[in-house]
Image (cartoon, rainbow, N blue to C red):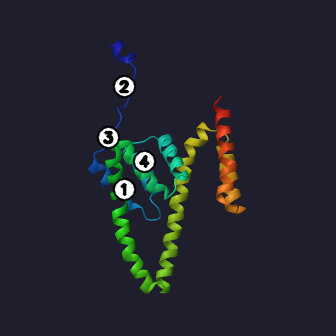
Amino acid sequence: MSDLAAAPPSPVPPPPVPSHAELFIAFFRITLSGFGGTLPWTRRMFVEEKRWMTADEFNDAFALCQFLPGPNIVNLTMIFGTRMRGATGALACWAGFLVLPFTLMVTVGAIYARFGDVDALRRVLVGIAAAAAGLLISTVVKMALPLVKTFGPAPFVFAATALAIGAMRWPLLPVLAVLVPISIALSFWVRR
């Protein structure tokens, strides 16, 4: 009996690698849920629900996607799909993520071209924009929490970036050219 009490808890096994169909369906579900942006839904599914990635892995992958050309979340579909199932996994994720929005946007674009000047439609779009901003802010907070725990100066880097780009309206590339090396140096300095 004492041997059982002294045994360390067994580690939680990693989740199984999703199949191509599971990858397609996961990204299709994200697309269906992703009004106002899909980043909050992607993070929730990968980190909190399916546990396919840790919070740190998600942040690292998304940080890489920020610096790649093209839409960040589309880049993330390709990186994640490749990580799970290689090139065919990337295609499954990409198709699941983009088939429905492409079809929907072509349809909505045609409707907006015809009825875009209707006042009621403009009011609906303002309401949707407010909800989308709230989703984005909540995701930023969730993504920032692990960084604050492991990287002490992170709040200062966040604040400097927000101030430089948001308040001062300085161009993105020069701000990143200065703050990224500073952030990397601070990260190495803190972890020494």
Badge 1 vs badge 2, beta-carbon distance below 8 Å: no
Q: Nearer the viewer, residue 127 or 165?
A: 165
Q: How many marks?
A: 4
Near mark 1 (Cα within 10 A), the count class, few <14, some 14-19 or many ≥20, is many
Q: Position of residue 5 (x, y in %)?
A: 37, 17
Residue at x-position 50% and y-position 86%: 119
The residue identified by callout 3 is 17
Q: Which amino acid does label 1 sit on?
A: Trp
Badge 4 vs badge 1, beta-carbon distance below 8 Å: no
Residue at x-position 68% and y-position 33%: 189
Badge nearest the viewer, 3 or 2: 3
Question: Where is residue 1, by image quadrant?
Answer: top left
92 with respect to 116 (left or right): left
Q: How far apart, in angstroms, are the residues tagged by discs 2 and 4?
A: 31 Å
Please tell me which of labels 1 and 3 falls first in the chain.
3
The residue identified by callout 2 is 10
Label 2 residue SS: loop
Q: What residue type is labelled 2?
A: Ser
Q: How far apart, in angstroms, are the residues tagged by discs 4 and 1?
A: 10 Å
Please tell me which of labels 3 and 4 falls first in the chain.
3
Q: Where is residue 185 in the image (x, y as percent from the top left)?
A: 67, 38
Badge 1 vs badge 3, beta-carbon distance below 8 Å: no
Label 1 residue SS: helix
The residue identified by callout 4 is 79
Image quadrant where one finds the C terminus: top right
Residue at x-position 43% and y-position 45%: 47
Please tell me which of labels 3 and 2 falls first in the chain.
2
Q: What residue type is labelled 3?
A: Val
Near mark 3 (Cα within 10 A), the count class, few <14, some 14-19 or many ≥20, is few
Q: How far apart, in angstroms, are the residues tagged by discs 1 and 2?
A: 36 Å
